[in-house]
Image (cartoon, grey):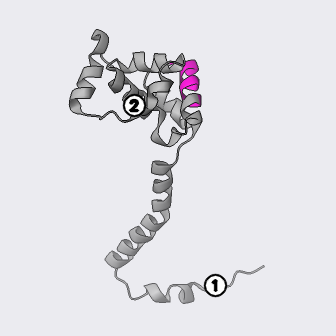
Amino acid sequence: MQRIDDFEIRRKHLASLTEEELEKRFWELTEKIVDPLIDLAYNHTSPSIERSVLLRMGFDSLACKAIVDKVSEKGLLGKGAGHVVLKYAIYRQISLKEAGEELARGEGWDRLDEAMAADITEEAIRAITTAGGEAI
């Protein structure tokens, strides 16, 4: 099978563009392709991604699974499991580690609506990072 060479036909609308205009068009088209992927990354998550976030926050895999399962059950996966732990820590004025451990044990979920209303401020972050005399 021989390929029909239609390069000249396909490039007609680009022939009059300068090198700079071609480069600009390239990046515009690239953004058009990549934007939906970036949107997906910002607006969608999964239990495995959330477990990974909690692992990087220092929780063990069993705690991560317990927290993510409950976050998912409560319909808060889109908020992020780490965010839920952070809000709960601020609400209770305890360290992130203590907050995560409580949530992993099944404690505090009945107060989560109140916790999610907590404001994340510099002062609140400072308070939880020194709670219990330990840094994050």
Q: Are marks 2 and 1 in contact (CB under 8 Å)?
A: no
Q: Nearer the viewer, residue 113 or 72?
A: 113
- Is residue 64 magenta-colored? yes
Q: CA distance from mark 2 to mark 1?
A: 66 Å
Q: Secondary structure at mark 2?
A: helix
Judged left or right of residue 63, residue 112 is: left
Q: Looking at the picture, does residue 78 appear above or below residue 51?
A: below
Q: Secondary structure at mark 1?
A: loop
Expressed as whole percent of the image width and height from the top left, the position of residue 11 reads 50, 85
Tell me which residue sits at (52%, 39%) in the image.
Answer: 77
Q: Looking at the picture, does residue 62 appear above or below residue 75?
A: above
User: In the rendered image, which residue does mark 1 sit on?
Assistant: 5
Expressed as whole percent of the image width and height from the top left, the position of residue 117 reads 36, 36
Q: Of the numbered discs in the image, which one, if any, rests on residue 96?
A: none
User: In the rendered image, which residue does mark 2 sit on?
Assistant: 114
Which tag, 2 or 1, sits closer to the chain's start?
A: 1
Tell me which residue sits at (63%, 84%) in the image.
Answer: 5
Quadrant where the C terminus is found in the figure: top left
Quadrant where the N terminus is found in the figure: bottom right
Find the magenta span and give its range. 60-69
Expressed as whole percent of the image width and height from the top left, the position of residue 91 reads 34, 25
Discs 2/1, front: 2
- At label 1, which amino acid type do we have? Asp
- Binning the other alpha carbons within 10 Å of mark 2 as few (below 14), some (14 to 19) or many (20 upward) gives few
Q: Nearer the viewer, residue 7 or 26?
A: 26
The majority secondary structure of the magenta stretch comes to helix
Expressed as whole percent of the image width and height from the top left, the position of residue 95 reads 35, 18
Tell me which residue sits at (52%, 31%) in the image.
Answer: 52
Judged left or right of residue 118, residue 6 is: right
Q: Quadrant of residue 124?
A: top left
Which residue is situated farthest in the left direction here?
Answer: 123
Tell me which residue sits at (25%, 21%) in the image.
Answer: 127
